[in-house]
Amino acid sequence: MASDEEVIQEITTLSRQLSKTKTERDVLRAQVKELESDLDVAEARSQLSTRLAGHTYKPPTWLTRKPKKSSGVVCTILSDTHFDEIVRPEEIGFRNEYDRKIAVKRLKSYFQKVILLTKDYITGINYEGCVLFLGGDIFSGDIHEELTETNEDTMLGSVIFWTEQIQAGINLLAEHFDYVHIPCVVGNHGRRTRRPRMKLRARDNFDWFLYQTLEERFKDNKKVTFDVASGADLMVDVQDTTYLLTHGDQARGGGGIGGIWPPLMRLVARKRNNTDFDYMVLGHFHQLIMAPSSGFLLNGSLKGYDEFAAIENFAYEIPQQALWINVPDKGILWQTALLVED
């Protein structure tokens, strides 16, 4: 018969084995969950590759046909959302806070206010449709170690989650407007590499993959069309006005007394060396500056003030996005900010 000491030793051994087995089980469960997520993305990518092989883009006819003088098109840009980045209020003087839960609320507020403003406030115009510019930096990504360490989810998990959220917002727009057109460019944060790249800039970016996934979701909806850029820029014709959509990271400088204005004016001038457009639409700098008379519309950020802005001593800016009305002969007639925090 075993002694008490031997029984205790056996119980201890079995307890350790049980604990080890439970740990291994939890690890395997996590691996299975991650593999299932990878499989979902791989299947979606396979479907996209098949569809893209024969893809050709044709602008929707409602955007380019001869407009009526009483008509207009609602234009808005969604960019610099930096989904699944964590901003801790205690690190920035409690000026802002950001996580997935807050981002969902702000995204919902953004889409709802596009409809609210055009339905109840900017009236008397026959809206032919809505152009939703997607300007990049939808995700914060893994381009810095600190982001990899603190992001709320992996990139694959983020793509799956936020595809559903943005799809819901586009559906809301499609319920309100006769047509919704969505031009898309990638940002610098969604890239898969730590260093920026020139070749395959778009196709190696998670923003691009999100856009393609959304386009696939709406392929049977005749009211919703996409134009996903293969490069850094995209020309967008709205009635008789031409926009150049770009993320904005091609602008350099901004640290002098003139602030961001000199780099933006230089970028507008350089772009016009090779392309003909009326207005450049961009984001990247998390500052809302709507200056059509100077040739550009600079978008704000859904994320808002963060640790980088605080450490660099940038001026505080509330989370906001841009909206404007395009009309025939005049281009941008009316412009405003969409405040997404409340």
Image: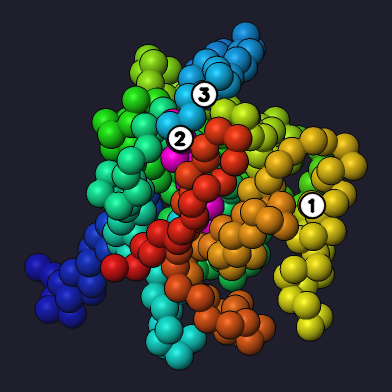
Q: Which residue is mark 3?
A: 67
Whichever of labels 1 and 2 marks the residue nearer the N terminus, that label is: 2
- What's under tag 2, amino acid-wise? Gly
Q: Are marks 1 and 2 in contact (CB under 8 Å)?
A: no
State left or right for residue 295 relative to residue 8: right
- Closest to the observer, 152 or 253: 253
Residue 121 location, x and y as percent?
A: 30, 52
Write down the region rendered in magenta.
71-80
State the residue at coordinates (62%, 9%). 54
Q: Is residue 54 above or below residue 21?
A: above
Q: Nearer the viewer, residue 190 or 114?
A: 114
Residue 213 shown left or right of residue 312 in the figure: left
Alpha-carbon neighbours of circle 2 within 10 Å: few (<14), some, or many (≥20)? many
SS at circle 2: strand
- The first of marks 3 and 2 along the sequence is 3
Q: Which residue is mark 1?
A: 268
Q: Is residue 146 above or below residue 159?
A: below
- Disc 3 packing (10 Å; few <14; some 14–19; many ≥20): some
